[in-house]
Image (cartoon, grey):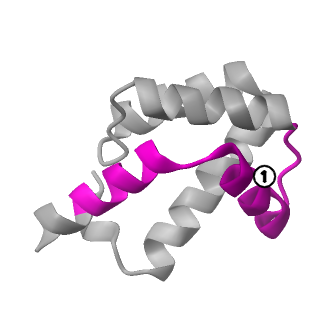
């Protein structure tokens, strides 16, 4: 079952659109521009990201910081951790 969940999460990351990112930004208190959302979505679609390992998350967050800023990347990291815990998915992440 965990393999299936991991595939779903990975597929969702690859399919995120700029408008979804802007919506999530408003929903979770992030301030990103349309250009930043386009850049993030493009990165996720063209790079293989592994959010399930510490190194993969760090790499993904460094790329986010380059496309936005360090503060936004830190907020994203905190939100990601909260969502993992809220949905009881801690066991999937190293």
Q: Quadrant of the N terminus?
A: bottom left
Q: Which residues are magenta?
A: 6-33
**Residue found 69% across the figure and 44% down from its top:** 18
Q: Residues within 10 Å of mark 1 (few under 14, many from 20)?
A: some
**Residue found 33% across the figure and 29% down from its top:** 48
Nearest the viewer among 89 and 36 is 36
x and y percentages locating residue 61 in the rendered image: 57, 33
Looking at this view, name the residue that lies furthest to the top: 66
x and y percentages locating residue 46 in the rendered image: 43, 24
Magenta segment includes 8: yes
**Residue found 12% across the figure and 62% down from its top:** 3
Nearest the viewer among 75 and 5 is 5
Total tally of numbered discs in the picture:
1
Magenta segment's dominant SS is helix
Nearest the viewer among 75 and 22 is 22
x and y percentages locating residue 21 in the rendered image: 69, 51
Q: Secondary structure at mark 1?
A: helix
Q: Which residue is mark 1?
A: 22
Q: Is residue 86 above or below residue 67?
A: below
Image quadrant where residue 89 sits: bottom left
6 vs 87, left or right, is left
Q: Is residue 24 above or below residue 38?
A: below
Magenta segment includes 56: no
Q: Is residue 7 above or below residue 48?
A: below
Nearest the viewer among 45 and 2 is 45
Image quadrant where residue 39 sits: top right
x and y percentages locating residue 37 in the rendered image: 73, 37
């Amino acid at each position: 079952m965990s393999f299936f969940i991991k595939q779903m999460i990975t597929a969702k990351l690859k399919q995120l659109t700029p408008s979804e990112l802007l919506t999530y930004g408003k929903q979770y208190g992030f301030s990103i521009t349309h250009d930043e959302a386009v850049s993030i979505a493009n990165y996720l679609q063209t790079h293989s990201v592994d959010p399930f390992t510490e190194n993969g998350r760090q790499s993904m967050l460094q790329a986010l910081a380059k496309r936005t800023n360090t503060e936004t990347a830190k907020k994203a990291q905190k939100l990601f951790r909260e969502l993992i815990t809220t949905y009881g998915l801690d066991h999937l992440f190293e």
